[in-house]
Image (spheres, rainbow, N blue to C red):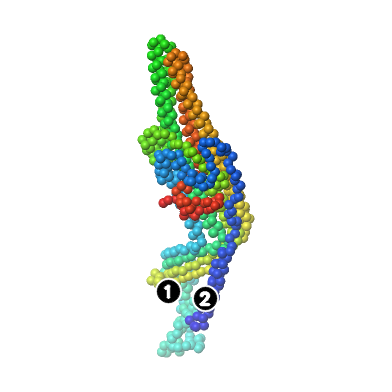
Amino acid sequence: MSPAIIFDLRRDYRSRITRAGLFFSLIAILPAGCMVGPDHVTPNVQAPDNWSSPHEAPEPTVTTQPAEAEISLSAWWGNLDDPVLSSLIERALDENLDLQLADARIRRAIALRGASFAELFPAIGLDSSYLHQRTARNRVARRDSSGPSATLSKSASNITGLGPPAANLRFGETSATISPPRPGDPAPNINVTRSRTFGGPGDGFRRDSNLYETMLGATWEIDVWGNIRRSIEAADADVLSSIEDRHSVLVGLVAEVARNYIVLRGTQRQLEITRENIDIQRTTVQTSQTRFAANLATGTDVLQAITQLKRTESEVPPLEALIQDAAFRLSVLLGQHPSALLEELIEQRPMPSTPDMLAIGLPSDLLRRRPDIRAAEQRLAAETALIGVEIAELFPRFSLTASFGLQTADADRYLHRDSLAWGFGPAVRWRLLEFGRIVSSIRAQEESQQEALIIYHQTVLNALQEVESYLATYLAERRRVSALEEVNEANRRAFDLAKEEYAVGMLGFLSVLDTQRSLFANQTELIQSRQQSLINLVNLYEALGGGWYADLDARDMPRDEPYAGERMEQEAPPG
């Protein structure tokens, strides 16, 4: 190859490299300042200055100090002062299957986010193949009827200006062989051959062919308009929303464990009171029978005493079944088979105590503490980012492709330099004739964002309503407990006095049975009210969003704004 041709080729390659360099530089500059679509902004929600429920009740004292509320709500079950309950909750946080399911969803969201992030980088693949191909016989036109070749001899006198004594000349499909003249011949011999190869045996045409190929290819879509980055934003929001969903599961789990535990202990207390009343009523039956035998009481007194005893005894089996059901539920919440905790919990213990101080914080604190509100905001952020993804479809998309590898028809020359093959170049794709469809997709995504915004506001209002309702019912039930305690004390004194007056004949037996029945009913009502008061307290803690950050370090807690957006690494589930 001449030096001039080599110079021209080098100059051509230098020109291509220069153009490619300019293209790369332009593509590298454009993404830095161009990303279409709106940015997410936390919705402005005006929360009330304070709760409307009354706080002036002397017991319990309610405080709205944010600092005290953070301490009280971080692990609120400790306020109930029950080590068994605290142990059950800690075990549930480690073994509950719903939490494990939420962890799996977080890991899935993180994996999908990684797939979105990978779109920023070139996609590189290696393809290696071997192809053996046979061409059909009829692919090539057949020869004419003159046979595979025709040889003509002409006199040398018809050809002038011949070269050396022997020469081979080719003119397309015609070849001529010139031989020196033989002795006695007046001119050289010229053999002219006209031939055409075709797909027949012995014709010199190769029907079988091979292709060995190994190519390394790369494709890189340049994120000029930010559609990939918006997709990453949406994936980030999906990860954070899945984390907040796990927090919601945790809040609900802790509350459900506490509710079932309170039901179990409250029912055990009801069963204890029922059995105590059964013993008292059995004594009453014996007393009535003794007095009947001494003609001091009637048969009606005996039958009424027996009837009241049997009625009280009939309440024992449902209470025992309710205790077992609560134990079964607690076992499943701890990720165990239903009867696993039955022996552990069957021993009777007192109900958890009510805290003297109830710290609930301000309504504005609820916006950053409730995980469902935080999850709703992240879903809104994801829908907002997807608007940018749809808008980017209005603009051209740029990509670069490159390939490098080996191609050969002979395996022996696979690694030869002549087998090298490569190529590169830019590509542009613009959906010019689909603007109507793209605009419709943008409008649909904008409506999805509005839907997420409405759901966010609705979630906030529901959260405020739940706190107001549970706070009111809790305080009301506490006042009811106080009133029932006074009634219970009065009923106990009345029953003791009735027994004394009956013993001296000042009071009839029916009056004794009435005061006894009233005392038992009041004792049962008091225990149920205490149980409901504790359940209302648990519901209030759940409505306040307490407990999900109990295992987080204090520095991870947002303190200065409704939602600080903690890093995913800090909030990722253990393991």
State if disc 2 and disc 1 touch (CB < 8 Å): no
Taking 489 as reference, is 345 above or below it? below
Provide residue 14's location: percent of width, then percent of height.
53, 76
Location of residue 365 in the rendering, given as x and y in whole percent from the top left corner: 55, 47
The answer to whether 142 appears left or right of 87 in the picture is right
Q: Residue at x 45, y 39 (%)?
A: 80
Query: Where does residue 177 sit, x and y in percent of width and height?
Result: 45, 82
Q: Quadrant of residue 419?
A: bottom left
Q: Which mark is residue 303?
A: none
Q: How many marks?
A: 2
From the image, tell me which residue sits under label 1.
417
Q: Residue furthest top?
A: 295
Q: Which residue is mark 2?
A: 13
Where is residue 40 drawn, in percent x and y?
58, 54
- Seen at 50% across and 51% down, the residue is 557
In the displayed structure, would residue 438 be above or below residue 320?
below
Q: Residues within 10 Å of mark 2 (few under 14, many from 20)?
A: few
As helix, strand or loop, the secondary structure at mark 1 comes to helix
Q: Which residue ends up furthest to the left in the rendered image?
A: 343
Q: Nearer the viewer, residue 397 or 204?
A: 397
Distance in Å between CA atoms under marks 1 and 2: 19 Å
Label 1, residues with CA under 10 Å away: few <14, some 14-19, many ≥20:
few
Q: Which mark lies nearer to you, 1 or 2?
A: 2
